[in-house]
Amino acid sequence: MEQSKPQLSRKPRPADWIAAGAVVLVALALLLLPLLVRSEAVTVQILQDGALLYELPLDRDTTVTVGGDYENTIEIHGGAVFVSHATCPGGDCVRSGAIRNAGRSIVCLPNRLEIRIVGASAADVVIETEGVCRPQS
Amino acid sequence: MQTAKLTRCAVLTALALALSLLERALPLLAWIPLPGVKLGLSNIVTLFALLTLGAPYAAAILLLRAVLASIFAGSLTSLVYALAGGALSLLVMTLASRSRRLSVYGVSVLGAAAHSVGQILAAAALMGSGAVFSYLPLLLLVSVGTGALIGAATAGVLQGWDALRARREACR
């Protein structure tokens, strides 16, 4: 009733590492490809309550602190933007890490803050924010 | 024999449905803030079905599970993602399982990676935009981890299954 072909090994084998390594390599290649190709001016916009506070070039390292109900420290470093420190209760904006591609954004809901990258090669749709800072219940 | 297979399919479909509903309750997204990241618990069932019943049965279970899961908790969009990811994943796993060098682990990792690709392709098609492809590298990296985990779980289940069959043979 069951199949008669040779059974697939139940224990990890060397080829598994090759398969996993190949997937990692493809992922890294896809990750690095846009960095090599993209060189046109890309800017970082920092908005609070929907109003533009700052517009900064992505390729110049800087640190900006935004006040309001809470305080968020936003760093631009090495072509990436991230929230390095936040006094909001959730801190999800810090945990959502760095963004580096046009069309991506970081949001801090408690401080009604949005950090987004816009550029010539921007995706014309922002699909989903990378992380949403929400107050912890 | 046909009844035994039918019963096994039914039990596996119910199990896959339960696992995919359980998975929705897991707060995996809180740790990895990326849309589309999940453990893929029901892939334990798909992989087990593929290896013990064959690809057509695994496809039937996958289809039933995806449709039922979207009826129980989900949307039409999540069904499209699940089907696109699942179909590509099953195809890749079917081919990979024919390899004599890979184990359950490797097949599971490749299946998880294919699921990510399928999901992204579906998302790009649904939104008519290629912007989602920027998520693919991260999804792929995560899928190596989740794939290995699901591979370990499936290997465990298969070892139990092997032992059960060996005992049944011995009784004969």
Image (tube, coloured by chain):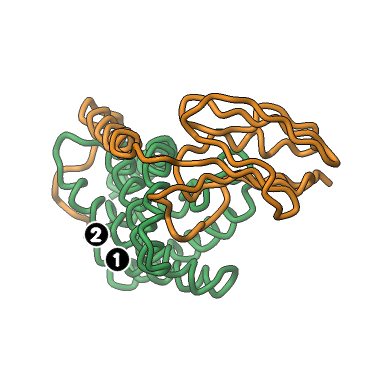
Chain colours: A orange, B green
**Residue B7 picture quarter:** bottom left
Residue A4 lies left or right of residue B66; in this view the side is left
Within 10 angstroms of label 2, few (less than 14), some, or many (20 or more) residues?
some
**Residue B42 position in % (x across, y down):** 45, 54
Residue A18 lies left or right of residue A78; in this view the side is left
Determine the residue positioned at 33% across, 57% down. Answer: B118
The amino acid at mark 2 is Gly
Determine the residue positioned at 28% across, 47% down. Answer: B169
List the residue tagged with mark 1: B57
Q: Is residue B164 visible?
A: no
**Residue B132 picture quarter:** bottom left
The amino acid at mark 1 is Tyr
Q: Are marks 2 and 1 in contact (CB under 8 Å)?
A: yes
Q: Is residue B64 above or below residue A28?
A: below
User: Circle 1 sits in a helix, a strand or a loop, which is it?
Assistant: helix
Quadrant (top left/top right/bottom left/bottom right) for the N terminus of chain B = bottom left
Determine the residue positioned at 36% across, 47% down. Answer: B112
User: Circle 2 sits in a helix, a strand or a loop, which is it?
Assistant: loop
Q: Mark 2, chain letter?
A: B
List the residue tagged with mark 2: B54
Cα distance, mark 2 to mark 1? 6 Å
Q: Mark 1, chain letter?
A: B
Residue A117 lies left or right of residue B167; in this view the side is right
**Residue A13 position in % (x across, y down):** 24, 28
**Residue B94 position in % (x across, y down):** 22, 53
Q: Is residue B90 above or below residue B75?
A: above
Within 10 angstroms of label 1, few (less than 14), some, or many (20 or more) residues?
some
Q: Is residue B113 visible?
A: yes
Q: How many marks?
A: 2
Q: Nearer the viewer, residue A75 or A107?
A: A75
Q: Nearer the viewer, residue B151 or A126?
A: A126
Q: Nearer the viewer, residue A77 or A4?
A: A77
